Image (spheres, coloured by chain):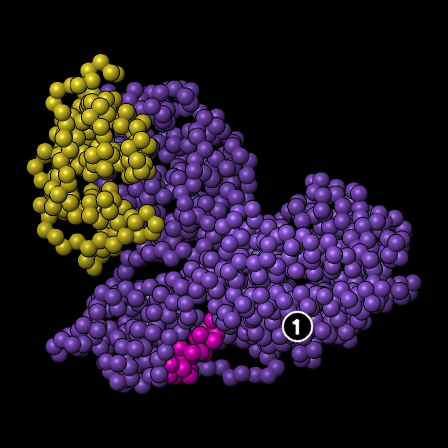
Amino acid sequence: MAAAAELKLLEKSLGLSKGNKYSAQGERQIPVLQINNGPSLTGLTTIATHLVKQANKEHLLGSTAEEKAMVQQWLEYRVTQVDRHSTKEDAHTLLKDLNSYLEDKVYLTGYNLTLADILLYYGLHRFIVDLTVQEKEKYLNVSRWFCHIQHYPGIRQHLSTVVFVKNRLYATSH
Amino acid sequence: MRLFVSEGAPGSLPVLVAAGRAPGRSELLISTVGPEECVVPFLTQPKFPVLQLDSGNYLFSTSAICRYFFLLSGWEPDDFTNQWLEWEATELQPVLSAALYYLVIQGKKGEDVLDPLGKALTHIDHSLSRQNCPFLGGETESLADVVLWGALYPLLQDPAYLPEELGALRSWFQTLSTQEPCQRAAETVLKQKGVLALRPYLQKQPQPSLPEGRAVSNEPEEEELATLSEEEIAAAVTAWKKGLEGLPVLRPQQNPVLPVAGERNVLITSALPYVNNVPHLGNIIGCVLSADVFARYSRLRQWNTLYLCGTDEYGTATETKAMEEGLTPQEICDKYHTIHADIYRWFNISFDFFGRTTTPQQTKITQDIFHRLLTRGFILEDTVEQLRCEHCARFLADRFVEGVCPFCGYEEARGDQCDKCGKLINAIELKKPQCKVCRSCPVVKSSRHLFLDLPKLEKRLEEWLGKTLPGSDWTPNARFIIRSWLRDGLKPRCITRDLKWGTPVPLEGFEDKVFYVWFDATIGYLSITANYTDQWEKWWKNPEQVDLYQFMAKDNVPFHGLVFPCSALGTDDNYTLVKYLIATEYLNYEDGKFSKSRGVGVFGDMAQDTGIPADIWRFYLLYIRPEGQDSAFSWTDMLLKNNSELLNNLGNFINRAGMFVSKFFGGYVPEMVLTPDDQRLLTHITLELQHYHQLLEKVRIRDALRSILTVSRHGNQYIQVNEPWKRIKGNEADRQRAGTVTGMAVNIAALLSVMLQPYMPTVSATIQAQLQLPLPACSVLPTDFLCTLPAGHQIGIVSPLFQKLENDQIESLKQHFGGSQAKVSPNPAAIETVTTPGPQQIQMLMAEVTKQGNIVREMKAQKADKNLVAAEVAKLLDLKKQLALTEGKPLETLKGKKKK
């Protein structure tokens, strides 16, 4: 998904009216937001954070110092780790790590949905749609978290729903 | 809270600095663990540093840890800090970790390490200088400064890796590095071992792979648009409105050009090409073309400019060539001087004078300098052991001996210098020397010679360099070369040779010797000026008023930056010495070197036969100018750059701008009513123009070309967004808008024509004729973007500027110039492509075969040296083979032919 399209999705999920213009910079098509009569902002997570503030939904950036730092940590993880991989095979270690991390968590920072969940959901969507039923079961915690986010009101929009099987089929395989 | 660190992990630097900010620092426990320990339970790869919070959560990102400490101290995050941190993680870290890995683990040095980082460092430097604040976020230090400083410190603490030309970056870095928390963190992490302290950590890391697209190029990239302030916009609009009146008064042309007191007097020289050969593209971009761009730019700035060059004609190589061709040395010089002059004329090189070194002035000035050095005791006499080839019955000049380098063991070291390690060699020190002509082993004979006492002059030289170098715009490679020479210590240099073809030595007992070209070739600039005007000393003995720019390839740096300055300083004659020494790296051809003997590469005289206009050659060579690192000429790339940058970007924009004026407004520039959007565009273009000036003032020729392309890209986008072709059909307001956009666009085109003048003079003149740009605006480039085509101005007839280069055309040229590399390919597909050549190519090859055949016959008739004949015969066979392949004859017949 092109970064500009992703930001449009985010805008909509935040309830922002359309109006921001995005361009893309360089080979990696890094998004640039031109703010009216102001300086431009460059970078997916930078712009996303800006949009959340624009929508007055600061709670999505975390409320304590700890949460705030964690949200930005996972946003960085999204653009440095997730975006670096091109196929689900590449992303194997990444999914394994995330699966282990999410074992005791509802959301990435604990008990509240944040921007990190939204952008990680958008970023992982292309891998998750390609997972086999067996792989989805292998990354059970990721699957649970992903399924939860995709049903969160307003986030998924036109992205395809990924189907997860409720009962375990390969219970002993790992 | 518990912080886990590991020895040599660079992330500890910013984290320790940031930790100092947080209240309750005593609660922070620091544990040092091994580099392979997995502290964070859910991460497969170990990561350091890691902060374990009291809640049990882990922060494993260096930026996030720093951010956390800053948040604890009450700091509020803002968009620009986020932007810097995201940039650091996604753009800086990949190139930086590669650079550190090269340096610490692979032991690479210098430009190999800095190259991948260049763009990122420049980005920081530009941001700092643009906003004109000491810190990234403004007047005070903040999170972004700490994170970036910490990332860069291990590398930049070594001054060799802190580029001098990035002034804003330097002062930012130095300010931070002297602060106490930073110093303490640096002490803790690097332990005074410098960057090598990172070794324990880095050697456990996988080798970072560099992101793609880091090769030398001016890849079009959408530049980040600068933030514009109200003042900048107001200033740009005011300047624009001045129009033609904003132009400075044209200074009259004088002949001859002489320095004028109170003006900027710019003397430009390009390394003197050696006369015995036809220059190849690398020679052309390395000196004459680069110097030409600067000379043209300098004239556009109305600086009083004199640009000189000439052929370097004395020496053994000329004598040998004369022997080969059965001519006298003078005849050879005359012949090749004309060839050189013709080539440069074709390339549109704007010399004020193109002279030569074999003139009475050369003898007079060289002998005068020698006398002064002699009377001041800077000349030594010594007996030299010299190599003499008994077979050829002569002393061998350095370049006619080859052997094994005594320093690095390189097998094909030349008698004067090793191509591999760059060290200077005394020919007799070569191991296993061979006469390059007959391959027999030369013997050592002694002969009396004169030496320039460089050690005695070293102090004067250092004094001069101390005044000249700091803050100057010498290219980094030139500084590096000079520095390493001085570090190794100077030794006396022999300045005479046992030859006939040279400047005679005016000393008893040396009547049969001449000066070595190393001593007198650089004096050529003076004598060439003396042949241009009898008042040459106004340029050359006037260091107060003259700025001397010297252009060359890097192998020439020692003579211009060291040997000549020493000679000149020793004379006590107040010579003008080089102020800007501009050295390029090497240009390769496709994947190898240019080689005359193997017929690989494009040589000056052949460029004209390709049917590609000189300006296209100039553009492409300047686009890939080996500025900062070696680069390569590639046919496919040339096609690509011509079709994308020239045709689709620059040509398309200028043509559209002109066409709109012709088609929609009857050839008259329409009224322009600037909206805030137009004003912003105007300001962006003004800033880009100023950037172009800054770059060219520092002789960053390749980078400035990029500015031109950026302006044209702005223009294209502007037209695309505003769609004047639709608005012209709309209501009154729409039509007025179409007029404004067209007027702005055609003015941008006019500006581009002037910015382009140093690079593509013919295209520039064509645009100016098409737009009927008023004469004063054609010959001056002010620092502001002015409206030079006011409403009501009538333009001329507009036509396309560039032609598409076609694939098959380029393929056939590639085959033609490929030399031996292109022909023997086991790949059947490759042979197939060779069998569909253009008839033009076959014709060219046939002509060459005939020419070479004649050479061989002539040599045989003259009973020339057997080895020389053999070399020419080899060339002939080579050509025949190429021809056969091109005509599609099977290889079998070819072998048969060869046996005959």
Residue B777 drawn in magenta = yes
Q: Is residue B582 above or below residue A2?
A: below
In the image, residue B524 lies at what x, y percent?
A: 70, 69
In terms of secondary structure, where does tag 1 sit? helix
Question: Which residue is pictured at 31% across the width and 57% down the height?
Answer: B226
Horizontal side of B449 relative to B573 (left or right) equals right
State which quadrant residue B333 falls in: bottom right
Q: Is residue B620 above or below residue B106?
A: below
Mark 1 belongs to chain: B
The colour with which the image depicts chain A is: yellow
- Magenta residues (range): B757-781
Asked if one can make out residue B592 in the rendered structure from this viewpoint, the answer is yes
Question: Which residue is pictured at 70% across the width and 78% down the height?
Answer: B531
Residue A71 drawn in magenta = no
Seen as rendered, the residue at the extreme top is A172
In the image, residue B479 lies at what x, y percent?
A: 59, 52
From the rendered image, report the letter of the chain displayed in purple. B
Asked if one can make out residue B746 in the rendered structure from this viewpoint, the answer is no
Image quadrant in which the C terminus of chain B is located: bottom right
In the image, residue B700 lies at what x, y percent?
A: 49, 60
Q: Nearer the viewer, residue B103 or B845?
A: B845
Horizontal side of B413 relative to B787 (left or right) equals right
Q: Residue type at mark 1?
A: Ile
Q: Which residue is mark 1?
A: B339
Question: Which residue is pictured at 36% across the width and 78% down the height?
Answer: B799
